[in-house]
Image: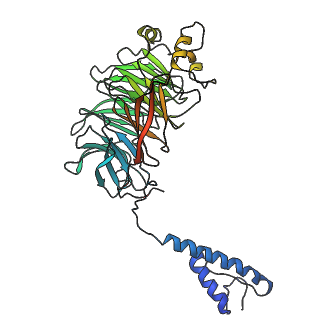
């Protein structure tokens, strides 16, 4: 083997030449210098590197299909219920799907050559609001398109200067959430902007659109704006002392539920007076609340968090006198900061805390209403809640595409007389040929 400094090596040994060729192909090395004598001991290291690269190359070439159906491992980009929770729309890497809530069944799957990060249904109609996303977005992430599924085409487009983080639809309104703004439009072609509001940074795209109001974070941390769709009045609700993490409006439009980033308390307000109606305690440890939803009668509310637990509360269990004593105006905070911070101590029954709450000078911790039943949620990551009737709760988790059905049962041996059991579960994208999200 002959060589010169600063020149490429000429390998005369055929064995060395083979490994050099292999290395050049799979390691992308232009040239290799192999000096004679003792330095040949480095040759085995070169061989190992070449073989490892060859193995990786071969594995990568085993399956080049873009779309895979991998039950239990496919990740949805989002899952959002329609207004009555009878269906939910799923954003996918190749379009969107609409699922029936109970039983969990595929209704439609529209395949696009790109991803949909947000899909929002308008009831059970043919209209959906779509926002592009994923690895290869179908639409720019700064646009909201209204898709007419009957015509199989886009009928309305709204474009913004920044990414869209949330959308809500009603038969007369389109609500669009940006990071620090929210806009309300008419549902018409072309749409007309009715209102625009500045908000605190709203990275989760929080907003609720009800029959009477739109609720969204205010310009100050912990505040919620409650915009009346009929009168145009905007009310500021000082709900918490830390950032808002979850919002929910009751089906009858009379109640607003809020949770902060502390996640220990859920506060229920009257939308008519902005007065606090009741205060519910999810737990004693800080948690991120994922979702909240009222039951069809508005008498119950379900809450999930990163603790992996579904809590169900009676909303109006307090007496009117107790509710009026907790009412607030726009100028008053509903409670001190200490009421929201993490507490320690054993969990007791609702009845005991109600009795303790009537005693003077006790912390507000003892006056909070606890959930009357709870259950373990097996789904991974963020989830959404839907009620299909007064005793049935559906939880959909997007990270592992898990659909879980919980039922509230009579349980005479329990303190509340109720129990919550997980009755059914499944992967809600099984049978839908969608790309595997790595």
**Foreground residue among 239 and 64:** 64
**Foreground residue among 14 and 374:** 374
Residue at figure coordinates x 66%, y 79% from the top left: 47
Q: Where is residue 297 shown, x and y percent of the image?
A: 32, 24
Q: Where is residue 185 shown, x and y percent of the image?
A: 28, 33
Residue at figure coordinates x 42%, y 52% from the top left: 134
**Foreground residue among 190 and 401:** 401
- Residue 430, by quadrant, is bottom left
- Residue 16, by quadrant, is bottom right
- Residue 252, by quadrant, is top left
Q: Where is residue 367 shown, x and y percent of the image?
A: 53, 15
Q: Where is residue 396 shown, x and y percent of the image?
A: 41, 42
Q: Quadrant of the N terminus?
A: bottom right
Residue 216 in view, yes or no: no
| In this view, 151 is above or below 43 | above
Q: Is residue 89 left or right of residue 262?
A: left
Q: State the residue lying farthest toward the left.
A: 151
Q: State the residue lying farthest toward the right.
A: 38
| In this view, 170 is above or below 240 | below
Residue 154 in view, yes or no: yes
Residue at figure coordinates x 40%, y 56% from the top left: 136
Residue at figure coordinates x 33%, y 58% from the top left: 113
Q: Is residue 289 left or right of residue 108?
A: right
């Amino acid at each position: 083997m002959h060589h010169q400094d600063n020149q490429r090596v000429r390998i005369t040994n055929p064995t060395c030449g083979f490994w050099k060729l292999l290395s050049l192909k799979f390691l992308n090395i232009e040239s290799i210098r192999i000096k004679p004598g003792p330095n040949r001991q480095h040759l085995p290291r070169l061989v190992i590197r070449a073989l490892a690269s060859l193995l990786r190359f071969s594995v990568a070439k085993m399956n080049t299909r873009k779309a895979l159906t991998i039950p239990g491992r496919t990740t949805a980009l989002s899952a959002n219920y329609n207004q009555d929770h009878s269906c939910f729309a799923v954003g996918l890497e190749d379009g969107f799907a609409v699922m029936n809530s109970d039983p969990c069944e595929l209704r439609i799957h529209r395949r696009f050559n790109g991803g949909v990060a947000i899909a929002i249904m308008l009831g059970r109609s043919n209209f959906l609001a779509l926002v592009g996303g994923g690895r290869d977005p179908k639409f720019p992430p700064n646009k909201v398109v209204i898709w007419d599924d009957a015509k199989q085409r886009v009928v309305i487009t709204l474009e913004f200067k920044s990414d869209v983080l949330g959308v809500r639809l009603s038969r007369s309104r389109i609500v669009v959430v940006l990071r620090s703004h929210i806009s309300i439009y008419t549902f018409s072609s072309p749409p007309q902007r009715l209102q625009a509001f500045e908000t605190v940074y709203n990275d989760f795209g929080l907003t609720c659109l009800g029959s009477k109001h739109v609720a969204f974070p205010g310009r100050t941390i912990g505040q919620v704006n409650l915009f009346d769709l009929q009168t145009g009045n905007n009310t500021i609700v000082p709900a918490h002392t830390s950032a808002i993490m979850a919002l929910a409006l009751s089906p009858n439009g009379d109640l607003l539920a809020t949770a902060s980033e502390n996640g220990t308390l859920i506060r229920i307000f009257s939308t008519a007076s902005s007065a606090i109606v009741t205060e519910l305690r999810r737990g004693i440890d800080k948690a991120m609340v994922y979702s909240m939803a009222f039951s069809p009668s508005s008498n119950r509310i379900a809450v999930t968090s990163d603790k992996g637990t579904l809590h169900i509360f009676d909303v109006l269990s307090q007496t009117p006198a107790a509710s009026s004593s907790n009412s607030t105006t726009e100028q008053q905070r509903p409670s001190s900061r200490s009421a929201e911070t993490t507490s320690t101590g054993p969990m007791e029954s609702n009845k005991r805390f109600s009795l303790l709450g009537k005693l003077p000078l006790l912390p507000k911790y003892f006056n909070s209403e606890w959930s009357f039943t709870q259950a373990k949620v097996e789904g991974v990551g963020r989830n959404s809640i839907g009620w299909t009737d007064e005793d049935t709760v559906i939880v959909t988790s997007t990270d592992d595409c898990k659909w879980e059905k919980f039922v509230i049962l009579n349980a005479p041996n329990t303190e509340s007389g109720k129990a919550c059991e997980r009755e059914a579960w499944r992967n809600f994208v099984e049978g839908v040929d969608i790309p595997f999200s790595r």
